[in-house]
Amino acid sequence: MENNIETRVVKPAISFFENEVDNLIISSQEESNLDSKVKEIEDYMANNSGKGKTEQEKDELYQNAQTLWHSYSSALKAAKYNFYLNRVQYRFLTDLILTKMEYDVNTVFFAIELTDMMASMKGAKYSDDQSLISFSVNATEITYIYHLISKHKVKGLSKDAYTFSQILYRIGGISKLINYYDATHKNLATDIQNWVLTFEDGVEMEESPKKKSKKEKEVTE
């Protein structure tokens, strides 16, 4: 049985370079919190075995792993990301969502759900058109924003088209990071189930190719 405890997706960029600075899509503290919870689950499975244990002890091991996994789930839902906009992008997006978009029965509730976020964005003070201001968003909010504005159309390769594409680019950077942590979340659920199977005699977990290649490299060095 394969040991897929290690994350099976490549972590995307957590920042982008603009205005001569690296702009963090997720804060170092938020990133550390999520990554540490993933490592805690991985380490728990790596350092604990149910072989030779009583059924009660096996159940306790499983429940402990589930508790760690649910803790990661909660952190993932609460995680905030930095949505950067310059003044032109900010005006374009807020005008689009608040006044220009037409909502139907399928989209109006998404727009209403964004009320709190839009209120927090209101009145942002920019000193110029190039400076970036970051707005705190969670996974649900950025998904709703994309769902709404993806319906929007711009005519020709105008200034609005460029602005629109930059906003989509910003959303894409956040979405990649969210997808990474979400995929890790789903993979760990499978890993825990596979780990529990090894509690039975005769069932072993093989090392992943990534771990094997790392060990081989250490030996050759």
Image: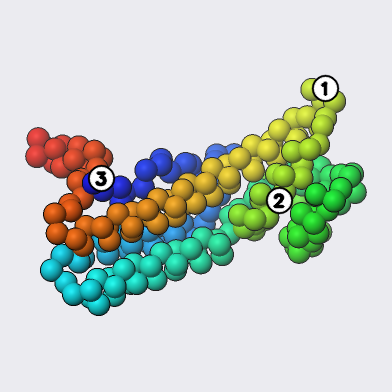
Pointer 3 local density, CA inside 10 Å: few below 14, some 14–19, many at least 20? few
Q: Which residue is mark 3?
A: 2
Pointer 2 local density, CA inside 10 Å: few below 14, some 14–19, many at least 20? some
Going by the numbered disc 3, the residue's amino acid type is Glu
Q: Position of residue 19 (x, y in %)?
A: 61, 40
Q: Is residue 190 visible?
A: yes
Colour setup of the view: rainbow
**Separation (CA) of disc 3 from disc 1:** 51 Å
Q: Is residue 47 visible?
A: no
In front of the other: label 3 or label 2?
Answer: 3
Q: Earlier in the sequence, mark 2 or mark 1?
A: 2
Q: Position of residue 159 (x, y in %)?
A: 81, 29
Name the residue: 21% across, 57% down: 198
Horizontally, is 98 left or right of 171 in the view?
right
Foreground residue among 103 and 202: 202
Q: Which residue is mark 2?
A: 144
Q: Earlier in the sequence, mark 3 or mark 2?
A: 3
Where disc 2 sits, the SS reads helix
Q: Position of residue 10 (x, y in %)?
A: 41, 40
Horizontally, is 125 left or right of 136 in the view?
right
Foreground residue among 122 and 214: 214
Image height of 204 relative to 169, above or below: below
Residue 156 disc label: 1
Q: Are marks 2 and 1 in contact (CB under 8 Å)?
A: no
Q: Position of residue 81 (x, y in %)?
A: 58, 55
Name the residue: 51% across, 60% down: 76
Q: Earlier in the sequence, mark 3 or mark 1?
A: 3
Q: In the rendered image, which quarter contains the C terminus?
A: top left
Going by the numbered disc 1, the residue's amino acid type is Gly
